[in-house]
Image (cartoon, rainbow, N blue to C red):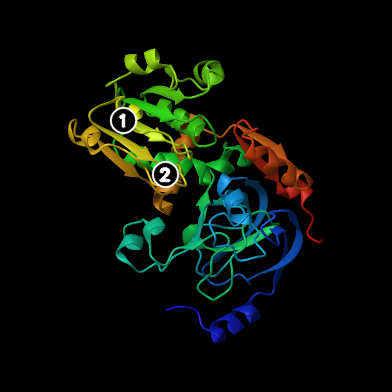
Amino acid sequence: MAPTAADAATADAKHTGKAVGLAARDASGHLAPLTITRRSTGDDDVAIKILYCGICHSDLHSIKNEWKNAMYPIVPGHEIAGVVTEVGKNVTKFKAGDRVGVGCLVNSCQSCDRCAEGFENHCRGIIFTYNSVDRDGTVTYGGYSTNVVVHERFVVRFPEGMPLDQGAPLLCAGITVYSPMKYHGLNVPGKHVGVLGLGGLGHVAVKFGKAFGMKVTVISSSPGKKQEALERLGADAFVVSKNADEMKAATGTMDGIVNTVSANIPLAPLMALLKPNGKMIMVGLPEKPLEIPPFDLIMWNKTLAGSFIGGLRDTQEMIDLAAKHGVTADIEVVGADYVNTALERLVKADVRYRFVIDIGNTLKDSE
């Protein structure tokens, strides 16, 4: 049932907490400080002081209303890392002082089959961390802010030893590539996975592939990324997608490809890199419909699939495995006053590979 006006009025009465967020007021996407309200800590809630928040390309799409669903003002951010300041009386998994994170979701119906199976990301009642209507009728504000209050179910624990700034992007970028690798069998030692695109998602996919014990080939249109892919990220091979000879040599060699590219590119030449029964899983979001000849799928039993983030159980599993194998995001930490510049650089892909805002030291509790 959709929230009613009465629900919203009741919610307003419960939103007694204050925070400062970096908000976009219109489609210019310019961010400026804004005092926002947070709900009081409920019985099942965890209150979190935000220390770091990653900048995701989705944030840019949202604040500029490129997906035509903006509810201004928008406080973006769904790669949140911080410490617990308070918990509700029913909370059993967390206590004050714990190092925790919040990803793309802050609520769901919590009662459907998908939620029961741990796939809250596929719940029809999904509530996103920002620019979404919560169950009490209020609009959610994200992690470019000083604090947040979230239901216990949607909070993950950061293991000791994982830096919060380098771990924050895993709550979106990490689970986005981990989930399809897990559910499509691209986590088996000795198998060969291709990673298409070497950016915020792709560099993490390379690291998980190596953590799984796989052979990893980076596929990129940028020859200049070869040294970084092989020497710094540990990929086993590099294929320039514009080089016909390199593409021909790699034909039919890969068990799967994680496609992180959001541009509309020809898929047929890339599908040719797959072995029979191979899979390409898309996690990028091209604007236009895909074009691929059915023959390319049918002749060799190939699969073209998609994957959308992951549930909370898988997110915690991903964070734990990342900590065990030393998988973190490569980041550039910026202050709150640099965020608009960082977003301009993000448009130009001028970051290796993820911006993270130092919320705790640079965003004040009052405007």
Image quadrant in which you'd find residue 193: top left
Q: Distance of mark 1 from mark 2, alpha carbons?
A: 30 Å
Residue name at image x 45 percent, y 37 percent: 260
At label 1, counting other C-alpha atoms closer than 10 Å, the crowd grade (few under 14, some 14-19, many 20 or more) is many
Q: Earlier in the sequence, mark 1 or mark 2?
A: 1
Front residue (pair 129, 247)? 247
Q: Which mark is residue 271?
A: 1
Q: Which secondary structure, mark 2?
A: helix
Residue name at image x 63 percent, y 72 percent: 40
Where, quadrant-wise, is the N terminus in this rendering? Answer: bottom left
Does residue 99 show up? Answer: no
Q: Which secondary structure, mark 1?
A: helix
At label 2, counting other C-alpha atoms closer than 10 Å, the crowd grade (few under 14, some 14-19, many 20 or more) is some
Frontmost of labels 1 and 2 is: 1
Q: Position of residue 127 (x, y in %)?
A: 49, 64
Residue name at image x 35 percent, y 24 percent: 214
Residue located beneath label 2 in the image: 317
The relative height of residue 208 versus residue 231 in the rendered view (above or below) is below
Front residue (pair 243, 362)? 243
